[in-house]
Amino acid sequence: MNIQSTNHERAAVSTPHSRPSALINRVKVTNADYAFIRDLIYAETRINLGANKRELVAARLGKRLRALGIRSFKEYCQRLQSNSEDGEIYHLIDAISTNHTFFFREFNHFKFLNDTLLPQFDAGKMGDPRSFNVWSCACSTGEEPYSIAISLAERFQRRTGVDWNIQCTDISNRVLHFASKAVYSEVHLKHVDASQRIRYFQKGKGEHAGSFRIRPELRERLSFQRLNLFQNPYPWRAKFQVIFCRNVMIYFDRQTQEELVARLAEHLAPGGYLFIGHAESLAGVSHPYKTIQPAIYQLPG
């Protein structure tokens, strides 16, 4: 999950008369309104928006306010307060989240997965050599877990007898719906080589030209569900050999980071690996892992 402003949003904020959403963008977001939204987001997701995201949040929420027929942020905050069970919090989370990703993003992670981690698994150094479990805990629109699936399919087609699967979670219903459809435009596949496109994608024709769908035999290895990383308990008993938690902790304060990495460690098999984003680090954070490479950590055992 990413909470950075796009060029479109910056333009919407700086030139409010240039598009139909101008009226909402001109509505004043008071200190009280923004504090309420910021505190609610933190309570629900532990995302720390900070004081400098006010215009971004206002721009992101404009479309939602229009859909509800609400003309002020004060009224919207009142709705969130008085209708806490109507699911509006999920729309709020979706609205403030931007998910920018592509296949095989952060190539060094996939090189390490293929060249180091999977050979260790084959050598019996990561628990049961007949079962390989991965958790993509902020899977966004699916490019990350499907990239992992391609890597595992390439590996395990040469070695029979391994039952492997990928659990895919995110806090956003919107991105999970997109990911579960498993359809992508060609621009998202720029780092997928031609042979992998043939083996793992179905090319769209006619009105679907330019689109690619993940083949069913790969798609069935993945399970998608909504999950708040701070809910209790997590829905699995099995341990994971690998957890991808990339570009998530950058939005958390240190206390929240420490709480999360400790919780993730409880679900890693001894010798398992945690991958975080290259813009993130556990430096200065209390944690149980051994640093292997930048953004790659291993649970001792």
Image: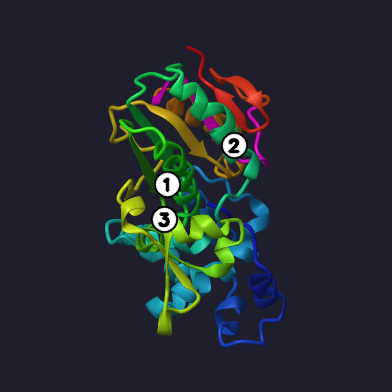
Name the residue that disc number 1 marks: 44
Which of disc 1 and disc 2 is earlier in sequence?
1
Front residue of 156 and 106 = 156
Question: Callout 2: 10 Å neighbours few (<14), some, many (20+)?
Answer: few
In the image, residue 189 sits, relative to residue 136, either above or below, namely below
Name the residue that disc number 3 marks: 172
Where residue 287 sits, quadrant-wise, is top right
Secondary structure category for the residue under label 1: helix
Q: CA distance from mark 3 to mark 1?
A: 12 Å
- Determine the residue positioned at 57% across, 50% down: 104
> Horizontal placement of 184 versus 7: left or right?
left
| Number of the label disc, if any, that sits on residue 253 | 2
> Horizontal placement of 206 versus 52: left or right?
left
The amino acid marked with disc number 1 is Glu
- Determine the residue positioned at 49% across, 49% down: 147
Task: State which region is magenta.
Answer: 267-282
